[in-house]
Structure formats: C-alpha cells, structure tokens
Amino acid sequence: MRLRLAAGAASLLCLSLTAASAGPAVDAARAGDMAELTALLADPAALNERDATGETPLIAASLAGNTEIVVELIKRGADVQARNDRGMTALHAAAFSGDLASVEALVAAGIAVDDADNKFKVTPLLVSAEEDRIEVFKYLLAQGADVSLTERHGYNVLSRAGFKGRSDVIAILLENGAVCQEADPIWFKECNRLKAEMGL
C-alpha cells in the first residue's frame, strides 16, 4: 500500500503554483500579466530566468494555464527544454494544468511527448492521466505517446490511472492495448474485470 500511495502522490509533488520567485518575469508569467511581462522582456535575461524551484516563465505560465503567455514566450525563443529542479518541463506543467492549447504549442515547439527525464520518471501522458485532463490525454495519445512506459516505481499509465479511479482514461487506455500490471494484485484483478466488461 505504501508503494501505491507514493506512486499516486508523485504528480502532486512535481509542480507548484506557489513557488517563491527569484525574478519578476516568473511572477508575471504565473500571474498572467502580459503587459508586465512584455516590459520585463526588454531585458533578454528575463526570458529564461528561474525561481527558487528552477521554474522559468514558460514553465510557470504553462502550469498556470496562461496560454497567451506560453505562446508569446515560445515565439520570443524561450527555452522549451528547460526543467525545474525536479526535472519537469513546461509540457509536464501544461499537462498537469490541463491547458490543451499550451500543450499543442509546446509539442509543436519540439518537446518530446514521452519525456521522462525527471525525478519521478513520469511522462506528460502519465501526468495528464493521473490529473484526469482528458483532452490533453487524448491529444498526447494522438501524438504517439507511449502507454507502456513506467514511472520510477515501475507502474505504467494504466495502473496510475487505476489507482486514481480515472474511469474515462482507463477505458481509453484499455481500448488502446494498455497492459494490466500484476504488481498490484487488487488493481490487476479490477483491471481485468474492466477489460472483460468492455469485451476486450
């Protein structure tokens, strides 16, 4: 049970809306203040400044769901590959917040949909599944996100969605051939029951 709780809590730990800022551009991006941010970006260093947790204006705007600012920062050349101190990118942040338009912009800008180079080894797909961001989840699947990848505890996206009771996500994953994992006997039994119920 302890392992299941640790796995289920990971995405709650990976991003923060209340990180202390080391610079005003991160604050402006987080607050959605385009006028203030535009003024601050007169200093080139502001584009990729970092707060105390390593978040850049782009990560902060993605997490807050400020699509207009995300698009503007990408247009100005913000580092779309930047990571916070847990290794999470702006795409993880946008997947966490459920901001589909930002997710689309970030994928178009070149962030890999299966990026898992972070402390939790979670992909944006897994984050969106666990947070029940269904439109983002469907989009990432359509972009070829791999449902078989596992996070640091060895659970795949189906198991993580199962632990959270995300019924819509679970159904889509099962229809797309995701595998019921034996690592958690309770979830394994329930997963196979759902498959049978769906005629799979």
Image (cartoon, grey):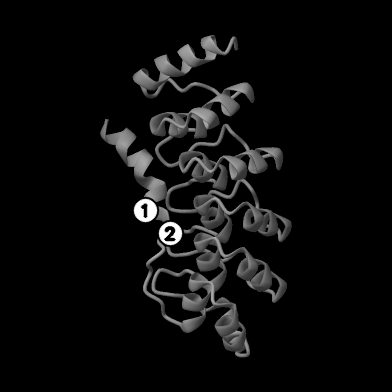
Q: Is residue 75 visible?
A: yes
User: 141 left or right of 163?
Assistant: right
Q: Is residue 26 above or below residue 11?
A: below
Label 2 packing within 10 angstroms: few (<14), some (14-19), many (20+) = some
**Location of residue 73 in the rendering, given as x and y in whole percent from the top left corner:** 64, 72
**How far across and how far down the image is residue 180, in percent?**
49, 21
Residue hosting label 2: 86
Of the 4 image quadrants, the one containing the C terminus is top right
Q: Which mark is residue 126?
A: none
Q: Secondary structure at mark 1?
A: helix
Under circle 2, the secondary element is loop
Rendered position, 31 above or below 64: below
Does the CB distance between marks 2 and 1 fall below 8 Å? yes
Can you give x and y, in whole percent of width and height, for residue 125 in the image? 56, 42
- Report the Cα–Cα distance between label 2 and label 1: 9 Å
Question: In front here: 55 or 72?
Answer: 72
Residue at 57% x, 40% y is 134
Lower position in the chain sequence, tag 2 or tag 1:
1
The amino acid marked with disc number 2 is Arg
Q: Amino acid at mark 1?
A: Leu
Of marks 2 and 1, the one in the foreground:
1
Specify whether 18 is left or right of 140: left
Q: Position of residue 126 (x, y in %)?
A: 52, 41
Q: Residue at x 62, y 63 (%)?
A: 67
Name which residue lies at 59% across and 83% down: 35
Mark carried by residue 13: 1
Would residue 73 be found to the left or right of residue 16 on screen? right
Vertical position of residue 145 compared to residue 47: above or below: above
